[in-house]
């Protein structure tokens, strides 16, 4: 176990980290008190994505550096989508790979929660995320929820409302947020960013809103360099391409190009007061896992709920714009509907 001095330092740091997240000092103190001294036990929900295996490989690397050391994935619940063919077909091989890395495969989320300190909710199917996140939050386990955080803006709002209710930290982000080039721009490389164009694949999955399934990655990269503050969007759609133009509150403009035809890649251009800079290419999963590790250690999410919800409001408003033949749609209009729907969903949940 930690010495009493080390524990006091950890509790103090964790309590400070909780400011602004709706987490009380006592909640963080209790969380810190329960932390293993040498190893944080991680549970994974959903083996229908390669992320589950890739993240585990990074945590289990015998040569892991300090930024990702001290974690062990000890249990995994495989499901996961039951009806998205691509995802369903990924589960058997991923399950066997996890077993080969010493991960116990369990038959329920309830069983998983008894064995772990923190949770990676990796289910590829965002429709399941609210249902799967609720028992994690009720159990008081900090959780990283992979993209998309949900398959509707209402579900995303409900997840953060539940996290606030149960005083449990939640973090969600695309790995594109942590491209070094994007972070340099966000941190002032070209001064204030006056506008940006981002692009990524935007393959559509019929069970999800158009951009939620894959376009989310490029949209998050756009918000990484521009920051929050988008007030409206307009979308132009063709079978092979999406172009979504967002207007920010200070008259900055950000555009997202979603690619379905031709070569696929990730990146963009930011236009600043002091220069123009490109961001990309994608650098793999490790930079995101470093952020997840820091989140699990401190309980402090590096991306605010407000920014994550704005990203999903941007995409939901883009869907509404498509339905209205490219009309301008405000983010506040879709947020109002989502808040009302989220309240109804949570009121229907017992406990």
Image: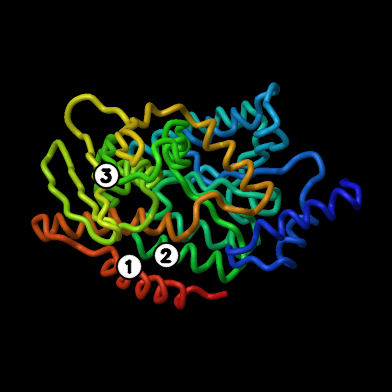
Query: Outermost residue toward the front?
Result: 274
From the top left corner, tell me how far across and down residue 195 is, in percent: 28, 45
Tell me which numbered mark, 2 or 3, is placed earlier along the sequence: 2
Disc number lying in front (3 or 1): 1
Q: Which mark is residue 205?
A: 3
Locate residue 273: give its quadrant.
top left
Mark 1 in CB contact with mark 2 (< 8 angstroms): yes
From the top left corner, tell me how far across and down residue 98 is, in percent: 58, 31
Mark 2 in CB contact with mark 3 (< 8 angstroms): no
**SS type, badge 2:** helix
- Is 94 displayed left or right of 249 in the figure? right
Q: Which mark is residue 335?
A: 1
The residue shown at (35%, 44%) is: 193
Locate residue 274: give its quadrant.
top left
- Of residue 23 and residue 340, the one placed in the foreground of this image is 23
**SS type, badge 3:** loop
- Is 38 displayed left or right of 313 in the figure? right
Badge 2 crowding class, 10 Å Cα cut-off, few under 14, some 14 to 19, many 20 or more, is: many
Q: Which residue is mark 2?
A: 157
Q: CA distance from mark 3 to mark 1?
A: 23 Å
The residue shown at (33%, 39%) is: 85
Tell me which numbered mark, 1 or 2, is placed earlier along the sequence: 2
């Amino acid at each position: 176990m930690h010495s009493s001095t080390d524990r006091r330092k950890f509790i103090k740091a964790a309590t400070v980290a909780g400011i602004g997240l709706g987490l009380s000092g006592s909640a963080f103190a209790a969380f810190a008190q329960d932390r293993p001294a040498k190893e944080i036990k991680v549970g994974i929900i959903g083996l229908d994505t390669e992320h589950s295996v890739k993240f585990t490989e990074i945590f289990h690397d015998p040569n892991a550096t300090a930024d990702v050391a001290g974690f062990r994935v000890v249990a995994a619940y495989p499901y996961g989508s039951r009806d998205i063919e691509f995802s369903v077909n990924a589960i058997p091989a991923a399950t066997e790979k996890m077993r080969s890395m010493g991960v116990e495969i369990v038959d329920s989320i309830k069983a998983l929660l008894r064995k772990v300190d923190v949770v990676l909710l990796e289910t590829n199917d965002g429709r399941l995320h609210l249902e799967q996140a609720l028992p994690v939050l009720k159990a008081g386990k900090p959780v990283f929820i992979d993209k998309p955080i949900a398959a509707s803006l209402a579900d995303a709002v409900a997840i953060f409302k539940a996290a606030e209710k149960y005083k449990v930290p939640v973090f969600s982000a695309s790995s594109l947020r942590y491209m070094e080039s994007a972070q340099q721009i966000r941190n002032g490389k070209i001064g204030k960013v006056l506008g940006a164009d981002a692009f990524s694949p935007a393959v559509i999955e019929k069970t999800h809103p158009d951009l939620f399934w894959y376009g989310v990655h490029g949209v998050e990269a756009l918000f990484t360099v521009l920051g929050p503050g988008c007030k409206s969007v307009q979308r132009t759609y063709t079978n092979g391409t999406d172009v979504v133009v967002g207007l920010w509150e200070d008259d900055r403009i950000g555009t997202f190009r979603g690619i379905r035809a031709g070569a696929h890649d990730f990146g963009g251009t930011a236009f600043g007061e002091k220069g123009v800079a490109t961001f990309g290419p994608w650098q793999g999963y490790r930079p995101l896992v470093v952020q997840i590790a820091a989140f699990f250690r401190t309980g402090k999410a590096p991306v605010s709920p407000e920014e994550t919800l704005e990203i999903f409001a941007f995409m939901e408003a883009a869907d509404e714009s498509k339905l209205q033949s490219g009309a301008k749609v405000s983010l506040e209009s879709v947020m109002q509907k989502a808040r009302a729907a989220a309240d109804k969903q949570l009121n229907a949940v017992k406990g």
